[in-house]
Image (cartoon, coloured by chain):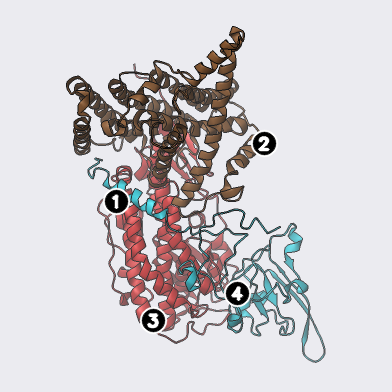
Amino acid sequence: MKFERYGIGIAKGMALTFRHLFRSPITIQYPDEKLVTSRRIRGNELVWFPEKCTGCATCAKSCPQGNIVISTHRGEGSKFEVDIFEIDSGRCIFCGLCVESCPYDALAMGLSYECAKYRRGDLILSKEKLAVSANHQPSAYYRPQFEDKLPKQSLLLYNQAEGGQKLKFLPLSKRKRGSGA
Amino acid sequence: MTLLEQFQLLLKNANWPDWAVYLTPAIAGILLILVFVLTIIIVFIWWERRLLGRFQLRTGPNRCGPEGIFQPIATAIKILLKEDIVPDKADKLLHFVAPIIVFVPILMLFAVIPVGEGAILVDLNIGIIYIIAISSISVIGIFMASWASNNKYSLIAGMRAIAQMVSYELPVVLSIVGVALVAGSFSMLKIVEAQGIPYILQQPLGFIIFFLGALAEMNRSPFDLLEADSEIVAGYHIEYSGMKFAMFYLGEYGIVLAYAGIMATLFLGGWQGPLLPPIVWFLIKVVIIFSFIIWMRATLPRLRVDQLMSFAWKFLLPMAVINLVIIAVEVLVLPLSMQWLIIILNFGFAAALILLWSKLFTLGGGRVEV
Amino acid sequence: MPIKTEPFYLNIGPQHPSTHGVFRLRVALDGEVVVGVEPIIGYLHRGIEKLAETRTYTQTIPFTDRLDYLSSMTNNLAYCLAVEKLGGLKVPERAEYIRVIFSEIMRISSHMMAVGFFLNDLGAMMTPVLYMWREREKIMDMFEMVCGQRLLYNYMRIGGVSQNLPDDFMPAVKKFLAEMPKYIDEYDQLLAQNEILLARSKGVGILSKDTAIGIGASGPVLRASGVKWDIRKMDPYSIYERFDFEVPTGDTGDCYDRYWVRMLEIRQSVRILEQAIAQIPEKGAVCADVPQFFRPPRGEAYGYLEGPKGNIGFYIVSDGSIAPYRLHIYPPTLINITALSDMVIGWKVADLIIIFGSIDVVLGEIDR
């Protein structure tokens, strides 16, 4: 191979990298800054509404991992009462098929994604852990009724004025030191 | 007279015994260099990571201290606390000695690099020859490390190291001879003083050859074949950890600092410059060269080993010889007052030679029939 | 007297920075020259074909995500095409357009990764990767917006797609398409004419036309060898016959051509996307009425399409129950790396790395 172009290609490439020096970085400082996730996020938790659930176990049947444990008994009238409803989020692949198959909208994907635990046993989501609470909200995956309440996703595509990702030259470490414990 | 000699004279006048007059300034100078080099290396590591981050649309380290400046210190502490692993079938003695042989000559280089008027540890009258001699020693250390690790990747790296460093020594030396010829001295101080106009203008081709050769000598992209992480993982220091790895790591940046200093001295007018104090001018020049090296690292892919060799032997070496001949003739024929004519002539020669070589010579071979 | 020598065996992988996963190459070297190469695969085997036999047809879709995890959408689509062929299902118009849009976005994303890591293998110190990840990140954002995840989408369904597009999607994709050509120009400026890149990749690892056809290579690897063969043109699936695009081909089949064909394909994908965005119907169903436990009739079907890496196919045998009797996956990169030993013999170790990188393998697919 000859250097037929006298290094013009190299110079062009170096000019491009030099221009990138003046563009704002595309990364964010994660634990300090957090992006708004998609409204339809399939977070690492599921949300279960006991009042809507009839105990039909369609979710358990549709789970590719066989991961949903549900056990019911016949209550008053013809209504089933759910005794056990457990999802092992350590084995779950978060495909969302259970949410899609639920005919009564009793199951939804969760919004949270920081769900690391110290013990495997803690990953099993029991009835109490699956219930709605302040920091355990359903996402709009296959549940368009929740869509309007959730904040708009921040996209890298738009700049910050257009409601995009927070992009700035984060200069000083002083600004916010790791607030997460 | 260097600052150190003045210090010696001062002690002598104060009636210190002879051995103390000799030893005290020497130890003080060595400590000064050690502190100076290590501080700058730490800043360099930070600067490289930060600047590389900015080239790549990242932020770079920014957590530890203001702007992340203490990150290299944190890294150093981490490296020093790591377990020192020696492979079972390694050659224990060579494995232990190799990092020292790599690192110590690099520190020795700083003895003759002037950072200001008289601010030089020892003003050898063969300063450049000393640099050429000492800087070649680290090759042996690298080869020892790669052989002693008993690792196939590092063995490949060692073989590459010998070939690469020995080949690139020649064009580097020849381009230095051009400078010495014009300056009329091998002493680093005299070379700096001789540069009314920086030699980069007078000998552009020499600077390009020296720069590319030095890049190969210090294993920087695009000639970083010794540690090509995508091919031979980490090259010669693949089996090193802990303090020994830290020696290689410091050595890597130390040699960049040394070569940047040599380049600034030989071609950019050393410490000379208006207004600012000499040390600041020296550091500015060094940082500019270092930033350029980082810029190249952020952009360029690396060459293959046979292309690397042919680049040294087919491109740089003949060009360096021709460059030397041109400069010798100019020194012989043209009077010193015609500086500007020499500059214009040399730029013309440089452009012509580069064009000619680009057209004429192929780079490296192709497939080998097996 | 000749010097007595013996080859030098080097294990590249399973843990190595440029094996793109857990791949092992047992290389015989003569100095730095490769004289023999033996790929060893199977470190990522998860038995997806067998798993599918005990899952319903819908439940297998999440597993197809995990084959070639850099182009999950097209894997999903290929599987769904096979099941639809088996069951004789009709896909709604709007769903077809959504499928095309996502296939092409996926192709851009996958090629971005392929080219970025090819340049990284050449030693360009992560810069091209990070520049290309910027575009990929925008694509990931759009996928996240639609299906809630960034890597394992599970979006295509038998008979359509799982959900309708959100309102924000169309403006986002239009803005993306408007910006994209400028960025592709930048990538070309960065390294396409770089002398070092040309010296490293031109004429290196040539895969001849006959060998490429002989081993059954597909995708950019085949097209770089000069064979104008693209399933989107040859046997249009979905609604690809409605779009106007070209099939870029290379001349020699070297590493540079494989890189350059990918860059050209990104431009063609942008072209298809622009047409699809203009034509997509505003309203309409996005999924045919398919029961949850879908029982196709007895028989067999082969669904295949032009994925980013090549021809990905799913062969399904149905016994009329809710689960396939047998599922076989035809992975493009497994076929493509069979050409590796033809390409690398006689080149240096450094060339071996870039030739392997230029094939663009994903080990999840090879080992299945």
CB atoms of marks 4 and 1 within 8 Å: no
Secondary structure state at the residue bearing disc 1? loop
Residue C238 visible: yes
The chain to which mark 2 is attached is B
Are the residues under badges 4 and 3 in a single subunit? no
Task: Look at the image and give the colour of chain B.
Answer: brown
Q: Would you call the spot at circle 2 few (<14 residues within 10 Å), some (14-19), or many (20 or more)?
A: few
- Compute the Cα span from label 2 to label 4: 48 Å
- Compute the Cα span from label 4 to label 1: 43 Å
Q: Which residue is mark 3?
A: C280
Task: Look at the image and give the colour of chain C.
Answer: red
- Give the left or right position of residue A64, taking residue B324 as reference: right
Where is C333 relative to B277, above or below? below
Quadrant in the picture for residue B126? top left
Residue beneath the point at 60% across and 34% down: B241
Residue C222 visible: no
Q: Which mark is residue A97?
A: 4
Instruction: State the image coordinates of residue A13 (x, y, percent, origin top left).
Output: 34, 50
Q: Which residue is mark 2?
A: B81
Of tags 2 and 3, which is closer to the observer? 2
Q: Which residue is mark 1?
A: C253
The extreme left residue here reads: B333
Q: Which mark is residue B357?
A: none
- Chain shaded cyan: A
- Compute the Cα span from label 4 to label 3: 27 Å
Q: Would you call the spot at circle 1 few (<14 residues within 10 Å), some (14-19), or many (20 or more)?
A: many
- Give the left or right position of residue A67, taking residue C344 as reference: right
- Give the left or right position of residue C210, taking residue A137 as reference: left
Tell me which amino acid carries mark 3.
Answer: Ile
